[in-house]
Each structure stands twice: as C-alpha cells, then as structure tokens.
Amino acid sequence: MQRYFINKTQINNNIVTINESDTHHIKNVMRMSIGDNVYVCDNINAYLCEIVSINEITTLRIVKQLENNPELSVNITIAQGKLQREKEEMVIKALTQLGCYQYIGVQMSKSIVKTKKITDNKIDRIQKIIKEASEQSQRNRLMKYVSNITFKELISNFVNYDLVIFCDIAESKNVTLKELLSEHKYKNILAIIGPESGFSKLEKDAIKNANALTISLGKRILRTEIAPLFLLSAISYEEEL
Amino acid sequence: MQRYFINKTQINNNIVTINESDTHHIKNVMRMSIGDNVYVCDNINAYLCEIVSINEITTLRIVKQLENNPELSVNITIAQGKLQREKEEMVIKALTQLGCYQYIGVQMSKSIVKTKKITDNKIDRIQKIIKEASEQSQRNRLMKYVSNITFKELISNFVNYDLVIFCDIAESKNVTLKELLSEHKYKNILAIIGPESGFSKLEKDAIKNANALTISLGKRILRTEIAPLFLLSAISYEEEL
C-alpha cells in the first residue's frame, strides 16, 4: 500500500492533513478516492489511514497505528568521503533500503568532488531519492542526509556516538565487527569510509588518534560504494535475522 | 599489485606465458619492465611472479604461491530473474567483489528483458566487468556467469546444490538465514531472487514445491538489485568476520 511521509504537526485529533504535492500523487498518480486506505509515517510511527476528503489538500482519518517497526534497532551513521554524484545517489538509495539512520558526505583530501559545486538542487534531488526509497522499502522514517562537512567537523562529531568504526583495508585491525555487534550494547554507531581514492595518511592518523576502532569488511577489497552496503547488510543480519 | 587471470595451461615448469591482450596491459598501460612483479591467478591459486621477457607475449617466472585465500568458504550461486542490462552489470560488479561463486540470469515471466536480444557482445562485456572486478577486489578466481536459462532449467538444477534458498518478501518464512548459516554444513548454496517485478504465482509455487527454503532478508523491502548484495554480505559476515 502507498506510504506518505508527513510531519507530526500534520496530525491533529486523529486527522492527518496531506500537502498539495502528496495530494497530487494521491489524486493523479494513484487515482485514489474517498474511503481508500494509505499509510502515513511521521518519522517515528506509521499509521493506517482512510481518505476522508480530496481537494487541493487531502484529509485522512487514522484507523490504527501499525505495530510492526521496520527500523534497525541500532542507529548507523555512514560518514563517507564525498563521492561523485552518480555514485552518491546509488549509495544513498541502497542505504535507505538497508535501514541506515544517517548519511554524511565528508570533504576528504582525495575526494574528486569539489564541495563548492554542491547546489540546493542537488540536495533536493537526494532528498527526493531518500523519500522514494523510504516509501518503497516501507520504512517509518526518512534517512537523515548531511551533504557535506569538513574532515575537522567529522572528528569533532565523534563524541556524539557510542562507537566509531574505521573501515580501511590497509590498516591493521583492532577488533572484528562480529565481536563489536555481538555485545548488542552500541546503539549509535558512526562508520567512516573513504572516497574513491581512499584516505590520506594524515586523515588515517587523525581518525585512529581519535580512538576509532579499525575493522575488516571481509577478505576481498570492496569499492567505496559497496563498503557501506556490506556494513548495513551485516548489521541487519546480526540484529534482525 | 596488478593481478592477471590465466588458464592453468599457461603455466609450464614454473614459467607463465601471458597472452597478447594482457601483454598490451603490462607493456602499455602499466609500463612495466623485466624484473617487475605481478600476481597471476589460475582460478584456484594466486602466484607472485617476476617478469622474465616482454615481446608480443610476456613470460613470467613464479616466485611463490600466495597463501592467503580470499575466496568465500561457501560457494554461493545467485539465480535471478533476468534484469535490465544496466542493473545486471551493477549487480555483477558488486557480487564479484563480494565473493559470489556464480551468477545465473533466469527467464522469468515478469522479466522485462527479452532473452533473444542478449548478444555475444553483451556477454563479452559482462565477462570483462567480472575480470576487472576480480582483479580490483584481489580474488583468486573469476565469478562464473550464465547469461540466461529457462525457469524449467533452474528448477531441474536444484539437485546440484546442497541448499536452495528462496528470497521473497511476501512468502511466509521456513527458517532464518542465521539458522541455516550457523550450522556451517552447506558448501554449495543456490539463492533465487526475482526480477524487478517479482515472481509469478506459478513460479513461486514451483520453487516451493521443489523444496527451496523461504528466508527473509531483513525487515525492509529491498529492490531486486540490492537483495543479492545483502545476501553475500551477510554470508561473508557469518563466515569471515
């Protein structure tokens, strides 16, 4: 069934007000009528709703809150050296489906992408990709997206997480991912992945000095766009299957 | 270091003969000289070699066999409803990096791709993608690729595997992937995944009647091009980390 993402403020006394853009989708794409059912998500919960009226905006009545929670029990943030647009879009679409909590593009010295070229249009396009992938994969919340931060900001953000893992094939490993995950005690994990050409020596040293734990992602060398998908799949396998 | 895939027949008395196409790469792309080192893989083992001569063909002397085996300890074959070319190429590139043993395209009733349009050129292009991804991810063997078989052939192939798993979100589950993998007794696994629009009712019934075990790939609905990546990542996590 079709799923729409709304703000909590759009719900009042069990009635949901749907904006013009989603109303267009309900009316002209889905061709739905009064009495039809849709799901809405307020970024925490999902609700089964019935359409009450369709005009320029649509109103829905909440029938019931859905009990099934499709979100990962661990909040995973991927911080990755800024990728070329096409690759970043592919990664974001996949990570949204895989239950990622947040994606942060980081200015790293070997990134090919120049951050001054990141326009609002590009950010809007990514937000649209996240919304569509969230609806299709039936998530309750939208993955957060931060277009770009500096490497210094990344390091100073470490304090916001209860575990920071560093994925680099060439570094010696501190611990296995399985050892970390099997404890089930980390709820807010930051994973750092390089851009296409990897990390600089300075970046590696800074990450290790800030006490990130270096882990392996299997026996083969993964391209940067596959590494975060591996990580999210492994975490979902450990936590959900 | 650069890695080249050869046939076992190219090795005689510790000397490896490299063909014209790879010689072109050694000479004109890598600009290597006599005395330089390369890796060669005969699809089972990998060897450190030294260049002895470079002419129209190149000869190498084997210095030593590498002990590190980067292959998954379980042979995973993905049989997937035939995908559109661009998606199939993306999936194959990723699965090669993730250690997949074999990929088979299957004619399914909801596949958009018409198999009569699969030319030798397209198959050559896929083989090239596999070779490059195998070199980059430093595998010892090339993933096998079967461009397309009928659905009937798929079912009759079940006898060649010691476990067949069926990945379909809508079907009730027989067992969890973790239960299956934690036994570490299956060495030759076939996993069946649908095309973009999923399986037909007839196909689902045929797969279940042939005793495939239905499993879940996490709590969210994955697009068909992400499902096999999830599976290989989960298996690598279970077996290698």
Image: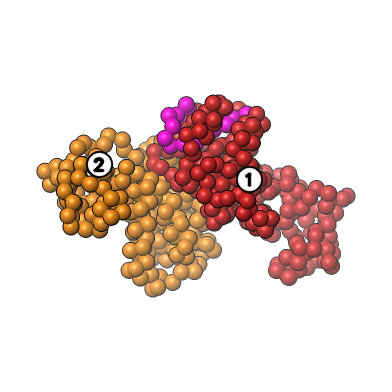
Chain colours: A red, B orange
Report whether B15 appears left or right of B199: left
The amino acid on which the numbered mark 1 sits, given as a three-letter code, is Asn
The amino acid on which the numbered mark 2 sits, given as a three-letter code, is Asn
Above or below, A14 relative to B150 = above
Q: Which residues are magenta?
A: A162-176
Task: Tell me where residue B185 appears, x and y as whole percent.
Answer: 37, 38
Image quadrant containing the C terminus of chain B? top left
Task: Tell me where residue A105 appears, x and y as whole percent.
Answer: 60, 45
* Residue pointed to by mark 2: B37
Task: Tell me where residue A157 appears, x and y as whole percent.
Answer: 65, 33
Dot label at residue A65: none
Asked which quadrant contains residue B65, the reply is top left
Above or below, A59 relative to B189 = below
Magenta: main secondary structure equals loop
Q: Is residue A167 magenta?
A: yes
Q: Residue furthest bottom?
A: B116
Q: Secondary structure at mark 2?
A: strand
What's the chain of the residue with tag 1?
A: A
Task: Work out whether residue B193 can be spotted.
Answer: yes
Q: Are marks 2 and 1 on the same chain?
A: no
